Structures are given as C-alpha cells and as structure tokens.
Image: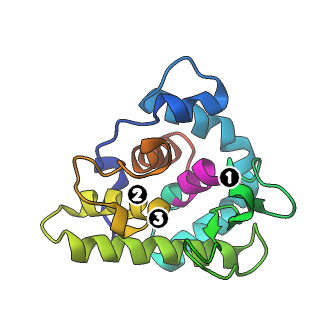
C-alpha cells in the first residue's frame, strides 16, 4: 500500500518490559510474534472491519491489527466500555482523548469501523508528519517513524537510530512492526 512495505521494515521486536505482559522469558521479534498470536483469536471478530478500513485508507490491515494487538490486546485490556490507559485513551486502537495528549474526541463505538477509521487517519497523519520532518528517510523508515509518532507524537521522534527512544516500553514501533509482520505472514491479514 502507499505507506511503505511493512515486510521490509527493520525491527528488533518487543522489549523485555513489553514481553513481560505475557510473562515471556524472552524479548525481541519472537516475543512480538507470540503476543500477536495470543491475540489472534480475539482479533478474528474485527477482521472484516480491519480489512474494510485498510482498503478504504490504503493502510495494510496487518498494521491495523498489530496496533490493535499492542494497544488493547484485541480489546482484552479495555475496561468500562472501551477505555484504557487510565481513562486517557479509548477504543481498540486507543485514541488519545487526554486534552494534554492527543486531545481527540472519540468517534463511534469502541470496536466500530468508525473508530478504526479515526485511529487509522491519526496514524496516516503522523506518517505524513514524519515524511515532512525526515524527507531523506526511505518510505519504510518513515512508516516506522509514523508508527512511533502514533504512540508519542512526531515531536518525540528525533532520529531513525533511536526512533523508539521516547515511546512506551522504548519499543513501540519495533514491536508493532514485528506484530504486523506476523499478522501479514501467519495471521492472514
């Protein structure tokens, strides 16, 4: 699709901290793949919506699934009708509604196609911001930078070498990319 090939994005996978969500005794790409696989059964109920939004927005469905896996564990980590991050984020893709953060207004039901469209548009916005900020990066590097910016804003991305330096777990884009690669090759997205 138009934002780079997720299969060509370099990744180191999940940090030890992130892997501990599932009490894994290892980190890296293998840990990201295991967490994606753990969420795969729950992800099935969203497959048609994810595919529809991916087609509509030109974003690989595997990437949308990967963000859902990382952000909400395919809905499993959400409470009180779709809330996460101590009430600061909402929905499967955890749109930041905190006025001091993203300041977005939640759209649609927490697991709706409307929500997935909104969150995917936010991702696309950040990919665009990273493209402007780092025009010499390859499209795959810009995609990875945009994924990191989805987590912490484009002002938190300063270099490709340390793209995740300010992200949650210091691995957000690396983990999401590895999960997306699993969803593309093994999850059927």
Query: Which residue position is annotated with label 2?
Result: 148
Taking 151 as reference, is 89 left or right? right
> At 47% across and 48% down in the image, what residue appears?
176
> Horizontally, is 181 left or right of 80 in the view?
left
Q: Residues within 10 Å of mark 3 (few under 14, many from 20)?
A: many
Per the image, the residue denoted by label 3 is 150
| Residues at marks 2 and 1, CA–CA distance in whole angstroms | 16 Å
Q: Quadrant of the N terminus?
A: bottom left
Q: Main secondary structure of the magenta part?
A: helix
How many other residues sit within 10 Å of disc 1, few (<14), some (14-19) or many (≥20)? many
In which quarter of the view is residue 51 placed? bottom right
Give the CA distance from mark 1 to mark 3. 14 Å
In this picture, which residue range is highlighted in magenta?
A: 64-71
Find out whether the residues at labels 3 and 2 contact each other: C-beta distance under 8 Å.
yes
> Tag 3 or tag 1, which sits nearer the N-term?
1
Query: For the residue carrying disc 2, how many other residues have a C-alpha within 10 Å: few (<14), some (14-19), or many (20+)?
Result: many
Badge 2 element:
helix
| Residue 58 numbered tag | none
């Amino acid at each position: 699709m138009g934002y780079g090939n997720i299969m060509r994005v370099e990744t180191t996978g999940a940090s030890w901290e992130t892997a501990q969500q599932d009490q894994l005794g290892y980190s890296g790409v293998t840990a990201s793949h295991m967490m994606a696989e753990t969420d795969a059964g729950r992800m099935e109920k969203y497959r048609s919506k994810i595919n529809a939004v991916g087609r509509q927005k030109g974003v690989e469905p595997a990437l949308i699934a990967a963000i859902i896996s990382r952000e909400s564990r395919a809905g499993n980590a959400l409470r009180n009708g779709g809330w996460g991050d101590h009430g600061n984020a909402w929905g499967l893709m955890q749109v930041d509604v905190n006025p001091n953060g993203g300041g977005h207004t939640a759209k649609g039901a927490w697991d709706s196609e409307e929500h997935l469209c909104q969150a995917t548009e936010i991702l696309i916005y950040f990919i665009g911001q990273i493209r402007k900020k780092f025009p010499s990066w390859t499209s795959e590097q810009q995609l990875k930078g945009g994924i990191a910016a989805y987590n912490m804003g484009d002002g938190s991305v300063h270099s490709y070498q340390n793209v995740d330096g300010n992200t949650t777990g210091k691995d957000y884009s690396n983990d999401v990319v590895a999960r997306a690669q699993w969803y593309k090759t093994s999850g059927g997205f």
